[in-house]
């Protein structure tokens, strides 16, 4: 898939007269889509969390590419400090939010996979609150019925 | 700056301030602060509702910077109604949680449990932690969530809406996780869905921005209308943006077939959290959906396919949610599936927005419809259904959670005859069932009536079938949930078979008083029924037509 | 349009796609998280190519730095999913990758086609931005946007980070009191080679100074609260892993510092709902916010450690 995507990208560059901004728009789309598809198809929790981050990077790249339009329309293409400050600020905001969610997700994964560390071994079915132990099993049943 | 405009900012910032301060407090102080904050939010929301009802849209340019550069807070009819519903439900649930701390989750404390001593023989090592009922982490998280909800309802800016949705999503995930070990997988699943939905929304916002050059909701709506009026308008980007935004928000509202995360999340959450999630949190996404479809995109004919797809998913949701609810044997999952079914109603109006038939009928001589009357009716019907659902579902989840906490189970079969021991709880369940089914006098009835009349006016007769079928289904599954609890006496002595109370209430008087909370909400469901016409009037304030 | 993509961007783009695939395709958690680390580095370069030093710094600090480090840490400490999911493996193992590849290509092509065709309009705020910069008291435009023009976004966003820390602390032992959720702060970090100790102790002050510089440079140049907070958090993590006794300090100060920035920000916002902040207020907010961000990120790091058998007796 990797050579295919790269070839697709390069072919696109050849076919249409892409600008730098459009190139990064294309990249951002590809990265976001790849992350999203992976996130939906994997079952491993950490892999999902990582794919979520890839999606986040892709969508932020879209926004930052839009931010660079100002620079491109103004002076010559390339690095300059003409990037739209409002959109750059939005990207920083988005980045911090993604980090916050990833942090919560990582801690949740650690707790879920380390249940034994958290509350001791052999504490699976008949734990303190007997009434609530049916919880998760119950919800699993509910799903299985579909 | 007038007092009302100050309220506009304060209604978001005050709960957030309380949330931050409560982190430093002890658990009793947090409960007191929670109740005080609820009162404050109610007090701050009232002037906004009064002002908007008098026909004035409120706008506050934050920091004094006007719209393309700064962020505008804007309260129109739609905002004010959702804000008010959130304030009422939030305040009542806060009082409930303050009266019954055990309903706020389960906390892990270090050390060996004394009451589990009999189990010690098969433990090889010292257990590092035991679970106790009640989690004071509820307060900062819920107050933060409340602030996020108000931020979403009042935001006049698309990116700010994204940030508000994230605040709501993050705190909602964390609130689910308070349910203890069994709730963690559900919380994690919810987290993935919430973030994926937000990212789709964000990409959609970026697309809209790239076409319009602004993030302000009203401004971008005007620019898109202007674009659509041009002859060779290429609105593919707007259509794609609406697809992404609708998909992202449908994930967050749990529209069938994207609903599967909701069942474990809402049913394994603590008793005080499930009502908040079901009544309020999914409404934030619904609110943004209505905002974007009505205010940003406007009636673009290119969106017809998407509108029909979403309405089809809505109809499927009513069917699937109801059938699945009928198959449940436990209260909380049944109520969660009923949420899935109710979500469907809120998407039915979309084809009405875009269908040219609507305006064609208005143009005909002899029709008495004003401009946008069909639209106004459909919107106020949908909003009435959503608000009614908020009140009723909060009441239903509170009662079910209360029973579950008392008896340690929410198996309907085990709770037969609970009505004798807890008449008030079961009565509030009955009242909210009236609201959810949409029996006359309730807000749900007004909603269905408004939606049905505008559907007929626009010639969308299919919607009547869906509404009637949905009503019958909801009557069936709610009877299934409530009727066994009402059984008074039977030959097999049902009340004796009620399971022994699992947890000793911390304070019996307070626990008794806490039952008032679902009752108040249940009463409100039924009493607000006559507000249907008033709702239509309020929604006219700042309406896009 | 100037036309043509600079060769450097083409190479960088290919590298980005390659590292995305290296992140997404492997089945080992460690390989995935290392892939994400690499992707973070390349993304930082991409931000630089797009001309945004601030975002590049934020990415390097928060995204590439702290975040990837957290995920590498997670993948090292729990290298595989413990639940035996293999038993319920789907029948057609080849189906998922194929469906994934096909749908990814389709979606990319469709979305990219729309993006590239869309008639774009430039931002409407350019004139207003330059006209209003004088009011802010800061010279750097991005800082101006973050803390003055769109301060409300930043306020809600710092609340998100604060509540994330509150949430992860709530997943530990206890619910109220200074020690709640912080058992990892009081227990010793896993041992590290002795040679690293002095390295860390030398590096930490340098990093600390770099963090402060980023904070104060923010008003005139690239940098600001988020970048600086990430660097300060990295200092804390390094010190903790070098067994510098921070436990008592953390327990008594983490929560107050965590909320101080948000509280002051809200109070200032309530006082200035329709007027811009004055510069001293702005500076106070930025400093407290930086400390709060550092504390929040550090809390997430500490809570990654399960409250296990090394509970410290009181």
Image: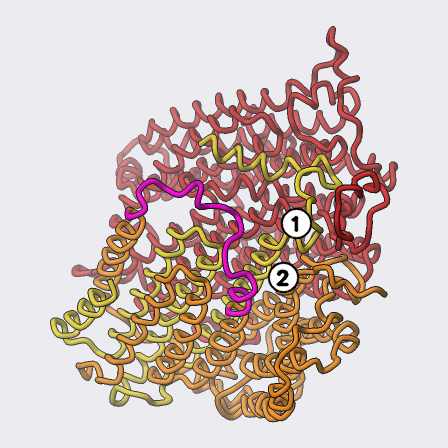
Chain colours: A yellow, B red, C orange
Q: Is residue C68 above or below residue B179?
A: below
Q: Is residue B346 magenta?
A: no
Q: Which mark is residue C185?
A: none
Q: Secondary structure at mark 2?
A: helix
Which residue corresponds to mark 2?
B12
Could you say where residue B339 lies in the image, as x and y percent from the top left? 53, 36
Can marks 2 and 1 be said to lie on one chain? yes
Q: Quadrant of residue A30?
A: bottom left
Q: CA distance from mark 2 to mark 1?
A: 11 Å
Using the image, name the chain to which the residue with label 2 belongs: B
B122 left or right of A107 in image: right
Which residue corresponds to mark 1?
B87
Could you say where residue B540 lies in the image, as x and y percent from the top left? 48, 47
Q: Secondary structure at mark 1?
A: helix
Dot 2 and dot 1 residues touching (CB under 8 Å): no
Residue extent of the magenta highlight: C72-94
The residue nearer to you, when weighing B233 against B31, is: B31
Could you say where residue B35 lies in the image, as x and y percent from the top left? 77, 52
The residue nearer to you, when weighing C187 against C162, is: C187
- Residue B259 seen in the current view: yes
Residue at left 71%, top 25%?
B427
The residue nearer to you, when weighing B295 against B165, is: B165
Answer with mark 2 or mark 1, whichever residue precedes in sequence: 2
The residue nearer to you, when weighing A56 against B395, is: A56
Q: Is residue A33 above or below residue C274?
A: above
């Amino acid at each position: 898939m990797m050579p295919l995507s790269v070839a697709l990208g390069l072919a696109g560059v050849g076919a249409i007269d892409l600008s730098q901004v459009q190139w990064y728009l294309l990249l951002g789309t590809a990265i976001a889509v790849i992350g999203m598809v992976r996130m939906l198809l994997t079952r491993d929790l950490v892999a999902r969390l990582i794919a979520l981050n890839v999606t986040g990077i892709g969508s932020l790249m879209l926004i930052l590419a839009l931010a660079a339009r100002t620079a491109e329309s103004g002076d010559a293409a390339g690095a300059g400090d003409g990037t739209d400050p409002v959109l750059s600020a939005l990207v920083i905001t988005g980045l911090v939010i993604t980090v916050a969610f990833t942090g919560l997700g990582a801690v949740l994964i650690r707790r879920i996979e380390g249940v034994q560390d958290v509350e001791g071994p052999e504490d699976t079915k008949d734990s303190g609150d007997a009434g609530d132990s049916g919880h998760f099993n119950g919800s699993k049943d509910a799903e299985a019925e579909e | 700056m007038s007092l009302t405009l100050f309220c506009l900012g304060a209604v978001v910032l005050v709960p957030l301030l309380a949330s931050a301060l409560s982190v430093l407090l002890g658990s009793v102080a947090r409960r007191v602060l929670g109740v005080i904050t609820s009162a404050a939010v109610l007090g701050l929301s009232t002037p906004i509702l009064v002002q908007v009802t008098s026909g004035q849209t409120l706008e506050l340019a934050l920091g004094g910077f006007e719209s393309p550069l700064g962020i505008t807070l804007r309260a129109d009819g739609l905002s004010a109604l959702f804000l008010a519903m959130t304030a009422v439900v939030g305040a009542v649930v806060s009082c409930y949680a303050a009266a019954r701390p055990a309903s706020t989750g389960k906390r892990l404390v270090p050390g060996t449990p004394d009451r589990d001593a009999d189990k010690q023989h098969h433990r090889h090592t010292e257990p590092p932690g035991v679970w106790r009922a009640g989690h004071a982490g509820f307060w900062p998280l819920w107050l933060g969530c409340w602030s996020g909800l108000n931020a979403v309802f009042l935001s006049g800016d698309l990116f700010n809406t994204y940030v508000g949705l994230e605040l709501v999503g993050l705190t909602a995930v964390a609130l689910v996780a308070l349910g203890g070990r069994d709730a963690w997988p559900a919380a994690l699943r919810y987290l993935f869905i919430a973030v994926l939905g937000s990212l789709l929304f964000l990409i959609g916002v970026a697309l809209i921005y790239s076409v319009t050059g602004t993030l302000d909701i009203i401004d971008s709506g005007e620019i898109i209308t202007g674009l659509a009026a041009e002859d060779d308008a290429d609105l593919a980007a707007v259509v794609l943006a609406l697809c992404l935004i609708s998909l992202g928000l449908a994930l967050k509202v749990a529209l069938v077939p994207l609903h599967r995360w909701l069942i474990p999340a809402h049913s394994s959450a603590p008793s005080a959290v499930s009502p908040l999630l079901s009544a309020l949190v999914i409404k934030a996404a619904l609110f943004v959906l209505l905002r974007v479809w009505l205010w940003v995109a406007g009636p673009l004919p290119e969106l017809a396919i998407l509108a029909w797809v979403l309405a089809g998913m809505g109809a499927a949701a009513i069917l699937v949610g109801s059938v699945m609810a009928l198959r449940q044997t436990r209260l909380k999952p049944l109520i969660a599936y009923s949420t899935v079914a109710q979500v469907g109603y809120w998407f039915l109006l979309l084809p009405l927005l875009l269908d040219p038939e609507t305006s064609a009928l208005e143009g005909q001589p002899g029709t008495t419809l004003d401009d946008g009357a069909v639209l106004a009716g459909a919107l106020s019907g949908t909003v009435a259904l959503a608000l009614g659902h908020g009140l009723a579902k909060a009441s239903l989840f509170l009662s079910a959670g209360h029973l579950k906490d008392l008896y340690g189970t929410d198996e309907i079969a085990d709770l037969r005859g609970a009505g004798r021991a807890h008449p008030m709880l079961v009565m509030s369940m009955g009242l909210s069932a009236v609201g959810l089914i949409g029996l006359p006098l309730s807000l749900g009835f007004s909603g269905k009536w408004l939606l049905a009349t505008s559907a007929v006016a626009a010639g969308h007769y299919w919607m009547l079938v869906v509404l009637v079928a949905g009503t019958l289904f909801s009557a069936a599954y709610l009877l299934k949930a409530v009727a066994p609890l009402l059984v008074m006496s039977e030959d097999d002595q049902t009340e004796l078979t009620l399971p022994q109370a699992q947890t000793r209430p911390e304070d019996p008087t307070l626990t008794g008083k806490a039952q008032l909370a679902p009752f108040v909400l249940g009463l409100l469901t039924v009493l607000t029924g006559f507000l249907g016409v008033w709702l239509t009037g309020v929604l006219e304030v700042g309406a896009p037509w | 349009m100037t036309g043509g993509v600079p060769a450097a961007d083409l190479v960088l783009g290919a590298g980005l796609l390659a590292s995305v695939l290296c992140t997404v395709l492997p089945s080992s958690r460690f390989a995935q998280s290392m892939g994400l680390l690499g992707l973070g580095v390349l993304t930082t370069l991409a931000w630089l190519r797009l001309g945004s030093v601030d975002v590049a710094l934020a990415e390097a600090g928060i995204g590439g730095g702290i975040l990837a480090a957290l995920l590498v840490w997670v993948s090292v400490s729990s290298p595989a999913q413990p639940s035996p999911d293999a038993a319920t493996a789907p029948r057609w193992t080849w189906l998922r990758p194929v469906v994934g590849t096909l749908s990814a290509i389709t979606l990319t092509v469709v979305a990219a086609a729309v993006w590239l065709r869309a008639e774009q309009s430039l931002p409407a705020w350019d004139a207003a931005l330059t006209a209003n910069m004088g009011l802010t008291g800061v010279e750097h435009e991005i800082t101006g946007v973050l803390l003055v023009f769109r301060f409300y976004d930043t306020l809600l966003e710092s609340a998100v980070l604060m509540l994330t820390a509150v949430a992860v602390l709530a997943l530990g032992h206890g619910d109220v009191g200074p020690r709640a959720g912080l058992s990892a702060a009081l227990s010793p970090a896993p041992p590290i080679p002795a040679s690293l100790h002095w390295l860390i102790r030398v590096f930490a002050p340098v990093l600390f100074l770099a963090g402060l510089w980023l904070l104060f440079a923010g008003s005139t140049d690239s940098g600001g609260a988020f970048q600086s907070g990430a660097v300060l958090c990295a200092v804390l993590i390094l010190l903790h892993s070098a067994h510098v006794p921070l436990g008592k300090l953390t327990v008594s100060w983490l929560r107050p510092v965590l909320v101080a920035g948000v509280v002051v920000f809200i109070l200032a916002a309530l006082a200035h709902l329709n007027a811009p902040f004055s510069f001293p207020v702005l500076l106070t907010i930025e400093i407290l916010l930086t400390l709060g961000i550092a504390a929040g990120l550090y809390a997430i790091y500490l809570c990654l450690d399960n409250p296990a058998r090394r509970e410290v007796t009181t």
